[in-house]
Amino acid sequence: MLDNLINPMHRKSFIEFGRRLAELRATDELFFLPKKAGIKNVLFLAGTHGDEPVGIELMKALGDGKAHDWLVANEKAVALNRRFVDCDLNRSAPGVLGSDKYEERRAAEILLKAKSYNGVVDVHNHTLETRTFIILTKPSFADLLLAAQFDINDIVVWPASEKRATGPLTEFADPAVEIEANRGDAGRLLVCLKKFPVQYSAPITRNNLIGKNIYWVYGKQLKKAEGWRDFEIARVGDEAFYPLMCGQYPGIGCYKMIRLSLE
Ligand SMILES: [Zn+2]
């Protein structure tokens, strides 16, 4: 059973997430993203990791900011073209306003600002050949609905592998997703993001899931075998899984995913 692969601390939310997903796929009902803060829909974050320029390029290419609100999340690290200055911003949420660590302060400031928005979209890029995908850092149905509004077909639910007090920015806002962009995909993403600000309010139906694949990260593989490719099924012994981020992080062969939907 798939459930047995899932970290016991996530098993309940895995089943609940699967149930909501199945419901969405089976009904003709319309779903809407929450309108909790009123007028402003989405705060885009770019440069959360200072060495990932694609988000900032996209935000600038989207225009003068009238159609979309955005900010450079890690200004100091972006200026230095480094992942972070004191600690990884995307592991520092919810943050501490009075901290002596820059990223801890910054995480708290950003999340405070995010409270005036209905949702958050944090744009990252990887340095692999892997296609652009969306990460949900928590198994939230609202996050899934937000992800479903983008023309990005691979959605990866990637909850924390252990209990810890701090984590990604998007874990502390709801709905919130990360876009993990392929560096060469900026042109297509620009079209996709241009359409998005109006799509926040548009109804979501099961049709939004057509062509989309939804995965759940359940573990990692330290040693990677030749020929493995992200999002293409691989095997170790009798375990079959979909690899993710093959070779992106030192010491990690890849992350392992199961697929929740078959389109
Ligand atoms: Zn990143």
Image (tube, rainbow, N blue to C red):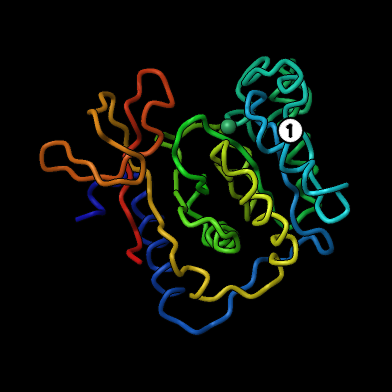
Q: Is residue 69 left or right of residue 120?
A: right
Q: Residue 31 placed where, x, y %? A: 59, 75
Q: Which residue is mark 1?
A: 73
| Mark 1 Cβ inside 8 Å of ligand 1 | no
Q: Residue 87 placed where, x, y %? A: 62, 19
Q: Residue at x 38, y 63 (%)?
A: 18
Q: Is residue 51 left or right of residue 38?
A: left
Ligand 1 picture quarter = top right
When the figure is inspected, residue 249 is found, relative to residue 257, above or below; the finding is: above
> Which residue is more in the foreground, 196 or 17?
196
Helix, strand or loop for disc 1: loop
Few, some or many residues within 10 Å of mark 1 (<14, 14–19, 20+): many
When the figure is inspected, residue 200 is found, relative to residue 193, above or below; the finding is: below
Q: Residue at x 46, y 32 (%)?
A: 128
Give the quadrant of residue 7: top left
Q: Residue 124 placed where, x, y %? A: 60, 37
Q: Residue 71 placed where, x, y %? A: 79, 38
Number of marks: 1
Give the quadrant of residue 158: top left
When the figure is inspected, residue 234 is found, relative to residue 192, above or below; the finding is: above
Q: Is residue 181 left or right of residue 250?
A: right
Give the quadrant of residue 228: top left
Q: Residue at x 43, y 67 (%)?
A: 21
> Which residue is more in the foreground, 41 or 14?
41
Quadrant placement of the N terminus = bottom left
Identity of the residue furthest to the left in this view: 237
* Tag 1: amino acid: Ala
Q: Residue at x 77, y 33 (%)?
A: 72
Quadrant placement of the C terminus = bottom left
